Image: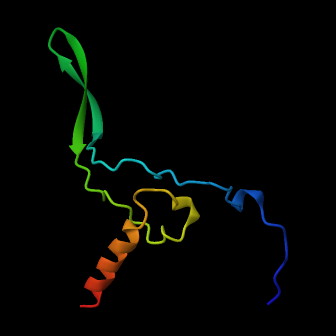
């Protein structure tokens, strides 16, 4: 099968020293407060109306460790304190799947 040869587009080239957005960020759990889907106006007798918006708090159950299983070989992860924890997690998961 024939393949066209062409120059690599500049937007696909990673600049030297590029880091991911999660690089060296602290890991913490923060609940998320969101609207539960409806907003209504409640009429108060003789006092006009009041706008009511219900909110719900959703707990954060996300992982605190890095889950990227190629962080040890990715240059964008170099220097990150969480580097390598994804590989360890992957080993644990794969060991459990073999049983």
Task: Tell me: residue 99, above or below residue 17.
Answer: below
Task: Tell me: residue 62, above or below residue 98.
Answer: above
Q: How many marks?
A: 0
Residue 43, image x, y percentages: 20, 19
Q: Quadrant of the C terminus?
A: bottom left
Location of residue 82 by image quarter: bottom left
Relative to the observer, which residue lies in front, 8 or 82? 82
- Residue lying farthest top? 46
Residue 13, image x, y percentages: 71, 61
Task: Tell me: residue 7, above or below residue 48.
Answer: below
Task: Tell me: residue 51, above or below residue 36.
Answer: above
For image coordinates 33% across by 60% down, the residue present is 65
Relative to the observer, which residue lies in front, 16 or 39? 16
Q: Quadrant of the N terminus?
A: bottom right
- Residue lying farthest left? 45
For image coordinates 41% across by 67% down, the residue present is 84
For image coordinates 83% across by 67% down, the residue present is 7
Task: Name the colour scheme.
Answer: rainbow
Location of residue 41 by image quarter: top left
Answer left or right for 80 relative to 92: right
Residue 40, image x, y percentages: 27, 29
Residue 83, image x, y percentages: 43, 63
């Amino acid at each position: 099968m024939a393949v066209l040869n062409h120059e690599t587009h500049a937007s696909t080239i990673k600049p030297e020293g590029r880091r991911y957005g999660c690089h060296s960020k602290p890991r913490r759990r923060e609940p998320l407060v969101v609207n539960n889907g409806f907003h209504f106006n409640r009429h108060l007798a003789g006092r006009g109306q009041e706008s009511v918006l219900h909110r719900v708090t959703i707990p954060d159950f996300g992982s605190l460790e890095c889950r990227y299983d190629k962080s040890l070989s990715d240059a964008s992860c170099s220097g990150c304190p969480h580097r390598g924890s994804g590989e360890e997690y992957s080993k644990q998961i794969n060991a459990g799947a073999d049983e």
